[in-house]
Amino acid sequence: MSGEWMGYVAATLTTVAFVPQALKTLRSRNTRDISLSMYVVFTAGIGFWLGYGIWLESWPMIGCNSVTLLLAGAILGMKLRYG
């Protein structure tokens, strides 16, 4: 087994760490204290990480960044809709 297992662990931990905050925001629809510029940059960055993972054919990067992009995109959409 290569060091790729570290990528799977890192991908899982960073994605799972983001889930509670995303769920709280999605449930409450309270985005007042979220920085719009930070979420625009963050979501774009996750999109680029996903693209990089696809280019590398790295399943840990593809999996975690797909989930995180979905959650971040939902929060960004709510921020744009609800302010």
Image (cartoon, rainbow, N blue to C red):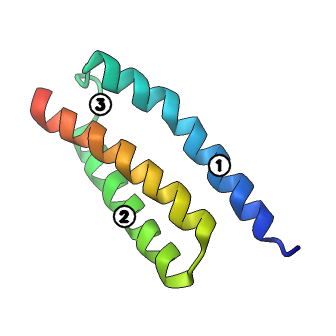
Residue 19: x and y in percent read 50, 34
Residue 62: x and y in percent read 52, 66
Viewer-nearest of discs 3 and 1: 1
Relative to 22, residue 58 above or below: below
Q: Is residue 7 left or right of residue 64?
A: right
Q: Secondary structure at mark 2?
A: helix
Find out whether the residues at labels 2 and 1 contact each other: C-beta distance under 8 Å. no
Viewer-nearest of discs 2 and 1: 1
Mark number for residue 12?
A: 1
Viewer-nearest of discs 2 and 3: 2
Query: Which amino acid type is shown beneath numbered disc 3?
Result: Ile
Q: Is residue 14 left or right of residue 26?
A: right
Q: CA gap, disc 2 to disc 3?
A: 19 Å
Give me the residue at 44% from left, 57% from top. 66
Q: Quadrant of residue 7?
A: bottom right
Give me the residue at 56% from left, 65% from top. 61
In this view of the protein, which residue sits in the foreground, 64 or 30? 64
| Residue that sits furthest to the top in the current view | 28
Neighbours of disc 1 within 10 Å: few (<14), some (14-19), many (20+) = some
Q: CA gap, disc 2 to disc 1?
A: 17 Å
The mark that comes first in sequence, 3 or 1, is: 1
In this view of the protein, which residue sits in the foreground, 18 or 41? 18
Q: Which residue is mark 2?
A: 47
Residue 26: x and y in percent read 32, 26
Give me the residue at 51% from left, 27% from top. 20
Query: Which amino acid type is shown beneath numbered disc 2?
Result: Gly
Q: Secondary structure at mark 3?
A: loop
Relative to 55, residue 36 above or below: above
Q: Is residue 45 left or right of residue 37?
A: right
Q: Which residue is mark 3?
A: 34
Query: Which amino acid type is shown beneath numbered disc 1?
Result: Thr
Give me the residue at 41% from left, 32% from top. 22
